[in-house]
């Protein structure tokens, strides 16, 4: 097998290893090697992983047998595309039938030392059972990606997202801890906590912030309300996950303008750890797919076959270092576009230039046009006079779908009159979306702010249809 830095199955890491602060790469060979050579090693790892799961997991053995597949059939990465994808609802159903971790747990339950999970707001919560071996591997993987962002042992990293079952917080925590930084697990979500976050950031000379883009914008708003210049906090770097934003130009520009810090995008999905396997390594939009941590395929949603570079699709993930609950071809239902590896970017991984910019089930159709909420965010947040929040309302008038965008309007920040501003924002949306939208300006602070993930889309077409059926009954 090709020898790479700390490449073994099961994964083994040298706990004493850390690059010198001047070194750009945590593992220079793995991160800059020829992609085809790396793919050869990834194929061998996939074969090892599938043999491991076949022996230990009734869930995978049943799925592959039903598809007429055996581990020995996977002789190439192209052949790997024939392995059936795993869907979130399958994981939930399997856990319901095989509590608490499901029959895709590949270790003895006594080896589980950490439990995380989904919130369960859209159905049965999914439990993530993590062994200590996986915990160490995940910490090392996240340290690698954070190192690429420029986080170093002399940094103070504030975790500004809930420290509950949310994997994002804990991944950032253990990654920063592994690379030797001071970690401040402050959390988020408690009433009045935003002002205290700012006070502690200043008192402890925090240099790196992790959270969601929505919360960073909220912190900037609270700072100004309390006569604190966000730039005076002297943050060096801010990295984000949990929602689109850090690669959406208007959102990242607002964060950079507020804090004068470098901004990095990251994040895949909760079931995938290390979730920073999609992570930026430069102060700009986009993320690398760190293929030697989690093998990422961008696939056609209909066929689940990889699309060519330059095309849009949905990521399908295979964790290459997880032994407790390995994810093998897990379907994300997110949307992205990928580009071929290019050594001039400093690493030879595939690149997602716009990051993860939406979900298939968040995308909606208006009069035959596909609309991504992040595209609306980008337009309205660019407008001089944007008051800090907005809501997207999808409705129906007769047989016609209508798009209405309520936008907080800050007259003091606008450079044109209110009616001209409305016209300009509407024209911007028409240009980007290909359809018209009604812009309704509202007063600043009309909408609630969030310490976590923003939810801005309201689709009342189903209500209209149900009322219409009730009337005609």
Image (cartoon, rainbow, N blue to C red):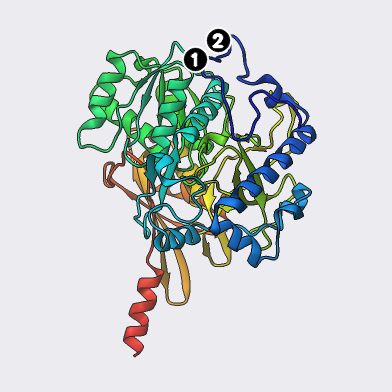
The location of residue 67, given as percent across then percent down, is 67, 65
| Whole-percent x, y for residue 310 in the image | 72, 45
Image spot of residue 469 (x, y percent)? 37, 84
Q: Determine which quarter of the picture holds residue 18.
A: top right
Which of 335 and 297 lies nearest the eye of the viewer?
297
- Classify mark 2: residues with Cα within 10 Å, few (<14), some (14-19) or many (20+): some
In this picture, is 224 found above or below 421? above
Q: Which residue is mark 1?
A: 152
Quadrant the C terminus occupies:
bottom left
Q: Identify the secondary structure beneath mark 2.
A: loop
Q: Which sits in the foreground, 185 or 189?
A: 185
Horizontal relation, residue 256 to residue 309: left or right: left
- Image coordinates for residue 144, horizontal then vertical, percent: 56, 24
In the picture as drawn, the residue positioned furthest to the left comes out as 192
Residue 334 falls left or right of residue 377 = right
Residue 431 in sight from this viewpoint: no
Q: CA distance from mark 2 to mark 1?
A: 7 Å
The quadrant of the picture occupied by the N terminus is top right
Residue picked out by circle 2 = 21
Residue found at the very far bottom of the displayed protein: 473
The answer, for residue 127, to whether it is visible in the render is yes
> Would residue 243 be found to the left or right of residue 391 on screen?
right
The reply to whether the C-beta atoms of the residues labelled 2 and 1 are less than 8 Å apart is yes
Q: Name the residue: 39% across, 77% down.
A: 465
Among the two numbered marks 2 and 1 on one chain, the one whose residue lies closer to the N terminus: 2
Label 1 residue SS: loop
Q: Quadrant of residue 130?
A: top left
């Amino acid at each position: 097998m090709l020898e790479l830095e700390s490449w073994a199955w099961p994964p083994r890491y040298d706990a004493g290893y850390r690059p010198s602060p001047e070194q750009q790469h945590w593992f220079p060979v793995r991160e800059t090697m020829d992609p085809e050579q790396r793919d050869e090693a990834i194929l061998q790892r996939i074969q090892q992983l599938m043999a491991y799961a076949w022996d230990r997991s009734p869930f995978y053995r049943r799925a592959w047998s039903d598809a007429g597949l055996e581990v020995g059939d996977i002789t190439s990465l192209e052949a790997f595309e024939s392995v059936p994808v795993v869907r979130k609802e399958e994981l939930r159903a399997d856990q319901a039938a095989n509590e608490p971790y499901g029959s895709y747990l590949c270790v003895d339950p006594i080896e589980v030392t950490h439990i995380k999970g989904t919130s369960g707001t859209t159905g049965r919560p999914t439990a993530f059972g993590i062994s200590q071996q996986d915990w160490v591997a995940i910490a090392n993987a996240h340290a690698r990606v954070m190192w690429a962002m420029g986080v170093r042992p002399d940094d103070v990293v504030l975790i500004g997202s809930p420290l509950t079952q949310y994997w994002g917080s804990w991944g950032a925590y253990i990654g920063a801890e592994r690379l030797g930084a001071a970690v401040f697990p402050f959390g988020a979500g408690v009433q009045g906590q935003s002002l205290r976050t700012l006070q502690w950031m200043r008192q402890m000379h925090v240099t790196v912030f992790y959270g969601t883009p929505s919360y960073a914008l909220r912190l900037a708003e609270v700072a100004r309300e309390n006569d604190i210049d966000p730039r005076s906090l002297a943050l060096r770097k801010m990295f984000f996950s949990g929602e689109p934003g850090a690669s959406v130009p208007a959102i990242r520009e607002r964060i950079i303008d507020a804090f004068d810090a470098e901004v990095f995008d990251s994040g895949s999905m909760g079931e995938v750890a290390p979730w920073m396997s999609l992570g930026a390594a430069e102060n700009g939009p986009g993320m690398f797919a760190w293929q030697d941590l989690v093998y990422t395929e961008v696939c056609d949603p209909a066929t689940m076959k990889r699309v060519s570079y330059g095309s849009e699709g949905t990521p399908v993930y295979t964790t290459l270092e997880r032994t407790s609950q390995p994810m093998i071809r897990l379907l994300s239902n997110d949307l992205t576009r990928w580009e071929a590896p290019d050594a001039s970017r400093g690493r030879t991984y595939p690149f997602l230039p716009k990051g993860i910019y939406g979900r298939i089930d968040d995308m909606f159709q208006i009069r035959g046009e596909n609309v991504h909420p992040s595209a609306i965010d980008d337009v309205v947040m660019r407008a001089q006079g944007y008051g800090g929040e907005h809501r997207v309302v999808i409705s129906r008038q007769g047989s016609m779908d209508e798009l209405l965008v309520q936008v907080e309007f800050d007259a003091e920040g606008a450079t044109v009159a209110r009616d001209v501003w409305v016209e300009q924002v509407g024209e911007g949306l028409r240009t980007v979306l290909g359809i018209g939208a009604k812009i309704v300006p509202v007063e600043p602070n009309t909408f609630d702010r969030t310490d976590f993930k923003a939810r801005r889309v309201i689709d009342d077409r189903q209500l209209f249809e149900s009322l219409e059926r009730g009337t005609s009954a």
